[in-house]
Image: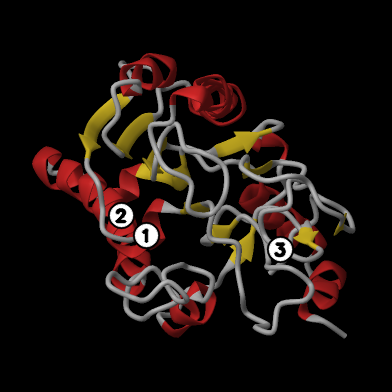
Amino acid sequence: MSFRKICFLVLPLHCLCSKIRDLALPAGKYAVILRGQTFRAGGRWGASCTPDREVQQMQMANSLVNFVLAPLESASGKPVDLFVTMSPCGLNGKLQQTYGTNRIQRMQEKTFLDQGTGYRGSIDLFKQFLAEEQAPATEYGLIIVTRHDMRFKQSIANLVADWSIPNFLSQCEFSSTHQDCVNDAMQSIPGAAFHTFDNAVGLQCGCLKAGCNDQWDHGHMCKPVLEGAGLRVGFMTSWRPWQRLREQTNPFADIALHVPRRSISTDDFVVVG
């Protein structure tokens, strides 16, 4: 018999209340760290600052505001603190206005050498703010890291996820040869776990380490790295792609650069991990 079943048999009220508390958006302020290229052309190697992607980029930005920032602000009663790194582009001013200049605490336009370097630069921008303000990361109930090229489809408040642990957007495709592979397009980190998360991410190739080759310049193998640091890892959705991570069928969010492909999902909002 599993621990969860024993828990509900022996201490049903206590366990139920604890689980409900973990699944609700946590109390406190929220931070969102935005990273990556803006106005990006389609495809894995699509160029940034592509003028004919303006309409799509603004749609993605509005989806972030409507389905992530606004629900978080409704939950906390406070503006989300936004930390933005973006590739240089003359169109970025439109993005800033859409994201909300009142929310943006720090912003940096910079071209990074690779994804690992860019991820570290985004995290460090947030850490610089904490140091300058002499504020601990624990002031934030939740810290979310996501990308400019994400399309959100429904409120983050609808997700049934364990916000008390670090979460990735989903598991990798069913055909993945790596059992621990994770979708690195988005992460949520409770403020209490941020220091440990920060120290672990970037330790090895496959977990957003700077300077890795194209085959390992990603965060898909971060789960064992974080678990090795003592963190339990979960997922925001139970959706899994059929063949590739960029299938555009995740019910919550996806990278809006590719044509939809077939996918398989069980209950899209069941806690996994």
- Camera-side residue: 129 or 182? 182
Residue neighbourhood size for the residue with mark 3, other residues' Cα within 10 Å, grouped as few (<14), some (14–19), many (≥20): some
Identity of the residue drawn at 37% across and 59% down: 115
Is there a contact, CB below 8 Å, between mark 2 and mark 3?
A: no
Identity of the amino acid at label 3?
Arg
Q: Is residue 214 above or below residue 89?
A: below
Q: Which mark is residue 242?
A: none
* Residue at image location 34% in from the left, 64% down from the top: 116
Residues packed near mark 1 inside 10 Å, few (<14), some (14 to 19) or many (20 plus): many
Q: Tell me which amino acid carries mark 1.
A: Gln
Badge 2 or badge 3: first in the primary sequence: 2
Residue flagged by tag 2: what amino acid is it?
A: Gly
Residue ID at (56%, 59%):
167
Could you tell me residue 233's position as x and y percent? 57, 69
Mark number, residue 244 = 3
Label 2, on which residue? 118
Quadrant of res 150: top right
Q: Quadrant of the C terminus?
A: bottom right
Question: As drawn, is 214 to the left or to the right of 25?
Answer: left
Q: Which residue is mark 1?
A: 115
